[in-house]
Amino acid sequence: MTTVSIGIAGASGYAGQELIRLAARHPQIEVTTAMASGANDAEKTLPALSHIWDGAITPLSIDRLAADTQAVFMTLPVAVAAEGGPALVARGVRVFDLAGTFRLRDRALRQRWYPATPDLDTPAVYGLTEYYRQELADARLIACPGCYPTAALLALRPLVDAQLLDGDIIVDAKSGISGAGKKPTERTHFSECHGNVAAYGVLTHRHGAEIEQEIGQAVTFTPHLVPLDRGLLATIYARVRPDVDDAVIASTFAEAYANEPFVRIRRDALPEIKHVTHTNFCDVGWKVDTASRRLVLVSCLDNLVKGAAGLALQNLKVAFGWPETTGLS
Amino acid sequence: MTTVSIGIAGASGYAGQELIRLAARHPQIEVTTAMASGANDAEKTLPALSHIWDGAITPLSIDRLAADTQAVFMTLPVAVAAEGGPALVARGVRVFDLAGTFRLRDRALRQRWYPATPDLDTPAVYGLTEYYRQELADARLIACPGCYPTAALLALRPLVDAQLLDGDIIVDAKSGISGAGKKPTERTHFSECHGNVAAYGVLTHRHGAEIEQEIGQAVTFTPHLVPLDRGLLATIYARVRPDVDDAVIASTFAEAYANEPFVRIRRDALPEIKHVTHTNFCDVGWKVDTASRRLVLVSCLDNLVKGAAGLALQNLKVAFGWPETTGLS
Amino acid sequence: MTTVSIGIAGASGYAGQELIRLAARHPQIEVTTAMASGANDAEKTLPALSHIWDGAITPLSIDRLAADTQAVFMTLPVAVAAEGGPALVARGVRVFDLAGTFRLRDRALRQRWYPATPDLDTPAVYGLTEYYRQELADARLIACPGCYPTAALLALRPLVDAQLLDGDIIVDAKSGISGAGKKPTERTHFSECHGNVAAYGVLTHRHGAEIEQEIGQAVTFTPHLVPLDRGLLATIYARVRPDVDDAVIASTFAEAYANEPFVRIRRDALPEIKHVTHTNFCDVGWKVDTASRRLVLVSCLDNLVKGAAGLALQNLKVAFGWPETTGLS
Amino acid sequence: MTTVSIGIAGASGYAGQELIRLAARHPQIEVTTAMASGANDAEKTLPALSHIWDGAITPLSIDRLAADTQAVFMTLPVAVAAEGGPALVARGVRVFDLAGTFRLRDRALRQRWYPATPDLDTPAVYGLTEYYRQELADARLIACPGCYPTAALLALRPLVDAQLLDGDIIVDAKSGISGAGKKPTERTHFSECHGNVAAYGVLTHRHGAEIEQEIGQAVTFTPHLVPLDRGLLATIYARVRPDVDDAVIASTFAEAYANEPFVRIRRDALPEIKHVTHTNFCDVGWKVDTASRRLVLVSCLDNLVKGAAGLALQNLKVAFGWPETTGLS
């Protein structure tokens, strides 16, 4: 059985730690290198992972990643990723970026939402696995989607593709605090989050542009921080076209995801965050009122797994032609 | 200084306890009677309130309430309130109902959403204080609004009244678990709520009808339970009419609430639940994008105070002609 | 590869669900039967486990368990387990009981702490794997330890066995709410637990007797409920004998657990609950002050894994002569 | 009615905000000055307090405090308080320090636990109100106790004073995260605290020395962080002397606190954090086993009120000869 030597650039963040945890379960992946997100960052121990990872986390070095690895997961600051990603690709390393730098195809949009990104010549594949498998097979640079877009798109794409929707789309999302990153800030202080719910980035969050790119339509997107660690629930509002009823929606979803191992369509009860945490599943459910044509979709995932590390690993397995479920189910 | 003897029917629930707590701070209110929500309920001690309330909670008796009190706060099952409320009014007691029974004016709607309610002849005033002060002065039966409608309406009413809005209105609300009541259920078990977010009553929650009644327009309303004890945040989506910009909205809110002691308009930062818990404030903020005419309103309150006990007390003070802020600021 | 057909009696509780989750990962275990904890219990679906377990949970039937399984995990009410366990053993099924019925060897103590238990002739092995491997190999009835005793004993046993301790032992334990079971009660209501810490069973919790049985010494044991879902931390106070210093303790632990896959001795930093949740590890650390001979031990585990389902599975693997770590690391 | 002009030095921390909140309710207190904890700190707005405090928080200036105020509450870094406190006293301002600088009377101990403190000539009164009322009347510099010592001492002092205890005393305390301060750190990050319990400062926390000073005996003190915002519960282990039973303990507590407005002795059920949050109460309960002479005390308070701001205000009222309960009950 061939193994692939993997580097993680940005290993001390929450997504990085989850990558170490998940990669350890896969027999063909060997994490040879785990680096911090900066060239001067001190090494850290990870007590929760001591049974899996006994190596140290070393300062970031693109050169060493290029020398030691065949594939790299990157969760780096945008400007660092914008340079490091193409440099690694140029030296034959396949790069799975988790941080947003390469997601927007339109240059003007990219400059608006990721101003630190230089113009990029390296073509990137948008790594929403369920919709880009063919492109992933040959991809060298994979832009893994954001956690919010993953939840929103897995719910919206089948209905948009089948032209069942009409009018405005609103995505109201609630995320656990790990989605705000590991850096201690006033926003992530326990006492500020506990007992609190707060909207942020209202009408200005860059994940909105990412959702719009993939469904080709304007979207109103509002993320909220809710007091839990991991997990994300998106409530999505739309109108269905006349004559679209519950059965049509059900069959559309059933067809779209019949062979997808990590999308579960819920008919009995609406998805809840607890059903998906610590798994790579995205659960999707809905309620529709045919009289008023109002549709409410609910989509859930673990922001650190299907919204980050699990999705990235799924992409790696597609890229290397391996079965997708090994180590993830 | 005159005092009013008050009864609380349903005193062992969360809203009931908050009523005891708040009423104790008001010099003109004497809680003479605190009853359980059933005629056979055992008495309970309330250790958190032992410094305020050393009486026992007695079984429910409408007769005793009629004999001993001038005004009653009711948080009772709908069928019990539907009988008890009018009975108390008939015997000269002013009734402030917190449980929904009397909120919907339309008989067909009431039968749909509160089927246990018999037809009612007793006219009720909808107790959204800020909009019904005049009617409250003479009211005998006050239907205090639900926690979700209070948050939604205080944000929507000024803009609807000024005809600034256009098209669909969506209310996506997130509530702490105390909003689900004190009865232990699978839904309120700590381990089910912790780390979880769940939508419920999607397209079928009766608070939707209540919001629609008060703004005269269809609304899509989705409540969610989030893992915190008390507090509620509503994110409201609408479109503004052409030429309505941030300044128009700001001046509309400023005018509507210039003299309101318990509505705070936030211009600097969007409201968060932590800013309002344990207070009678409803905080309202917004973001508008004039190009796309998209408006996002955020409204917050403590579901047990401004969404229940505080609001009811505010109504009592209006009904008795007292200053509204005593004991509540 | 031989497989063993397994039944779970009490599958809808938290430990039962964790058993399903963990058993699914083991190639030699086939869960053929999952039953509720009562003969009249309705069946339930388990949405979080839908990808693992698509069977229904059927009403409890000892006969069917005897017919269909080679080994049974029981999390049943004491009186039910006291009958069902020996009955299954008599019909050739190996029984791993998680509920306490069979833990206390002394008959008088058993009658005091588990009064529903009839006198039992079936000999049980106390399933603290690390200390009873030899007995487990042939055991037919295994009394899996409680979550609190597991944490306390894994920290205390090496020091007690080496006679390093002196004087009183105090175990102050903090547990997540899942330890209080799945039944909705006032005690487990989210709003009662959130923002709360409460001691319970002070000087009267039966896990105290269990700890005392295994170390042969009186212990003061106080459990507390803390507002988290899963995980347990025990802070243990003792005095060391003269001349016992940090190095002696370290070498004693190192020797005791050198080959144990699921006990991690922490020298760098004290254990925390987050390091062990969703794993089968028990982490143990300590601080000692040689001048005053005061010792503080800290021991952590996930009450649903190493404190229940994981421990039970570890015992099963020992009992069947399989490697202990498969599917658990 | 005379009013006193108050300054708060360190107003943006959690204790500082609570001081603003509580002081606003007292008719004789006027907060004229609220300062940050450093001379270069930017001003902040406090949205949760906007209805109470519309002034800005200005950079720290001892000179301005001396000019503008009659009394100052200080929650400043030790070194800053060590200079600023005596300087204010020298200029006629009464100082209530909340940060620890002045608590330890023994010079050697103070140098060990508060090394940044220079030798101090200014005599300080230890502000455990219930035991130092007489000294507080004339005090110029009041060292308000720490939150942990307040909980431990209010439970221990009556029994120690009556000589009912024997042998070792262990204080195992569980505190909400606000006790760790407002500064964002890895330790206070929501995702690190949520679902976690961690012991810290084991055998080395300076509050241990403070407890020992006040009861004249060695104490083993272990604090833990638990995932809630505010509130603290101390479980205290001791042995009673022979012939000390439940009745003796009860009468000792009853006598000690008969006239204390803010200590509640719980006989029915043990105290829990939820009974005291947002109040100035310290609740104390116990269980004793006379056969083994083992005693477990449980003591609860809100670390920001009775453990900080409320206690400091209580001291101010004693110092100025006012009734203690105004604005605090």
Image (tube, coloured by chain):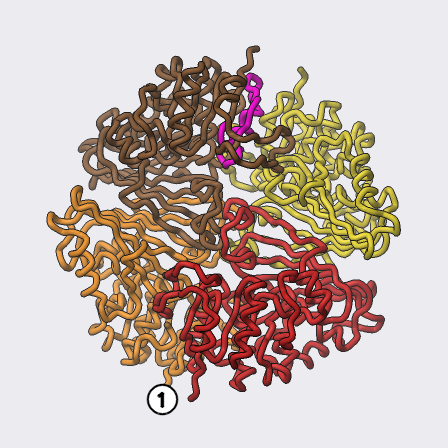
Chain colours: A red, B yellow, C orange, D brown
In reply to whether residue B127 is colored magenta, the answer given is no
Residue D264 at x, y percent in the picture: 41, 29
Q: Residue at x 59, y 61 (%)?
A: A232
Q: Residue at x 19, y 32 (%)?
A: D241
Provide the residue designation for mark 1.
C1
Give, as a three-letter code, the residue at label 1. Met
Q: Is residue A226 left or right of residue C290?
A: right
In the picture, residue C149 is in which quadrant?
bottom left
In reply to whether residue D34 is colored magenta, the answer given is yes
In the picture, residue C176 is in which quadrant?
bottom left
Q: Identify the residue at the far top of this view.
A: D1
C65 over B239 or under it: above or below: below
Magenta residue span:
D9-35
Query: Is A232 or A90 nearer to us in this picture?
Result: A90
Q: Residue at x 37, y 29 (%)?
A: D145
Query: Is B143 or A118 nearer to us in this picture?
Result: A118
SS of the residue at dot 1? loop
Residue C321 at x, y percent in the picture: 27, 80
User: Is residue C21 in view?
Assistant: yes
